[in-house]
Image: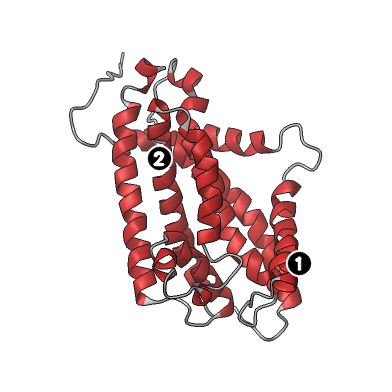
């Protein structure tokens, strides 16, 4: 008769990849639960995931393109905004949901053992399913509105920038999740932080429009690289600078590594602090 012994690790980082793989059925169950719970008891179901970026694109077109006359570098405004909203929605939704994962699943963590990192990873995978739905709609609009002016010549770059968005959202989400365990009122500041972050990201304006005084804020933002990378993947152009690339990748990896460390430290004693 086999038995499983669970004990606290004394190492700096106790992630066990083989243990994580052995709990893959738990990961699958959480992915399914996370995705289905989003549109449970809704009228339109997963169609809401499609309607949201379309409505945002229309509002941005009306406010920032028609009224404010902010340029879109020759890209149809609906596609300009929709393309940026694809990675941003994935990033913000993933980060916000991950930041609540320990508190939301506290009742499960008290009763069942499994690698706690399964929770944030399941959220990332679930959000990828939502991203795929929105990407399909974008591609339809892309082919309908762009005509023969654009091509898919740089589309191979998109998965790389999506991976960067995943790393950034996981790192940010883990940091907030760890801090929220001790300081519950941070969840209110989190919403404000993401609103500010959105306008510091070139979603409604091209990164080239940023003045020299504010350019550093745009360059150090890892989501700037992701958003500009998505636009470059579909519309071409040389909008990504070496400074933007180095800061984007470096800060994203820093957030991910430190986020994993601080999450691992908190999750060991989280149940005792509930």
Mark 1 or 2: in front is: 1
51 above or below 61? above
Is residue 123 in sight in this rendering?
Answer: no
Where does the C terminus fall, quadrant-wise? Answer: top left
The image position of residue 47, as x and y in percent, is 75, 48
Q: Decide which of 211, 78 is in the foreground and name it.
A: 211
Q: Decide which of 258, 140 is in the foreground and name it.
A: 258
x 67%, y 70%: residue: 79
For this view, does 197 lie left or right of residue 145? left
The image position of residue 129, as x and y in percent, is 60, 49
Residue behind mark 2:
174
Residue behind mark 1:
62
Q: Residue furthest left?
A: 10
Q: Decide which of 38, 152 is in the foreground and name it.
A: 38
Q: Residue furthest right?
A: 43
Q: How is the image coloured?
A: secondary structure
At numbered mark 1, what does the secondary structure look like: helix, strand or loop?
helix
Q: Decide which of 220, 271 is in the foreground and name it.
A: 220
Q: Residue furthest bottom?
A: 149
At numbered mark 2, what does the secondary structure look like: helix, strand or loop?
helix
The CA distance from mark 1 to mark 2 is 36 Å
Where does the N terminus fall, quadrant-wise? Answer: top left
1 and 2 marks in contact (CB < 8 Å): no
Mark 1 or mark 2: name the one nearer the start of the chain. 1
The image position of residue 140, as x and y in percent, is 72, 68
The image position of residue 170, as x and y in percent, is 43, 46
x 29%, y 31%: residue: 265
Question: In which quadrant of the rendered view does residue 113 lie?
Answer: top left
x 31%, y 37%: residue: 262
For this view, does 142 lie left or right of residue 105? right
208 above or below 114? below
């Amino acid at each position: 008769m086999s038995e499983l012994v669970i004990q606290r690790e004394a190492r700096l980082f106790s992630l066990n990849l083989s243990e994580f793989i052995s709990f893959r059925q738990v990961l699958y169950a959480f992915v399914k639960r996370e995705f289905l719970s989003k549109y449970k008891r809704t009228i339109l179901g997963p169609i809401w995931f499609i309607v949201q970026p379309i409505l945002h694109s229309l509002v941005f077109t009306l406010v920032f393109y028609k009224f404010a006359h902010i340029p879109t570098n020759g890209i149809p405004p609906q596609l300009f905004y929709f393309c940026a909203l694809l990675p941003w929605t994935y990033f913000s939704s993933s980060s916000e949901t991950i930041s609540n994962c320990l508190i939301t699943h506290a009742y499960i963590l008290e009763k069942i053992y499994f690698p706690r990192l399964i929770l944030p990873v399941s959220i990332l995978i679930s959000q990828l399913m939502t991203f795929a739905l929105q990407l399909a709609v974008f591609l339809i609009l892309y082919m309908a509105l762009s005509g023969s002016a654009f091509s898919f010549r740089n589309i191979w770059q998109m998965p790389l920038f999506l991976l960067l968005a995943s790393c950034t959202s996981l790192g940010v989400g883990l940091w907030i999740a760890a801090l929220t365990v001790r300081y519950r009122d941070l969840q209110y500041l989190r919403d404000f932080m993401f609103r500010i972050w959105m306008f510091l990201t070139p979603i409604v304006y091209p990164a080239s429009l940023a003045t020299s005084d504010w350019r550093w804020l745009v360059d150090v933002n890892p989501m700037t690289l992701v958003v500009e990378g998505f636009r470059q993947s579909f519309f071409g152009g040389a909008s990504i600078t070496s400074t933007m690339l180095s800061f984007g990748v470096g800060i994203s990896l820093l957030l991910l590594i430190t986020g994993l460390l601080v999450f691992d430290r908190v999750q060991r004693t989280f149940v005792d602090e509930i």
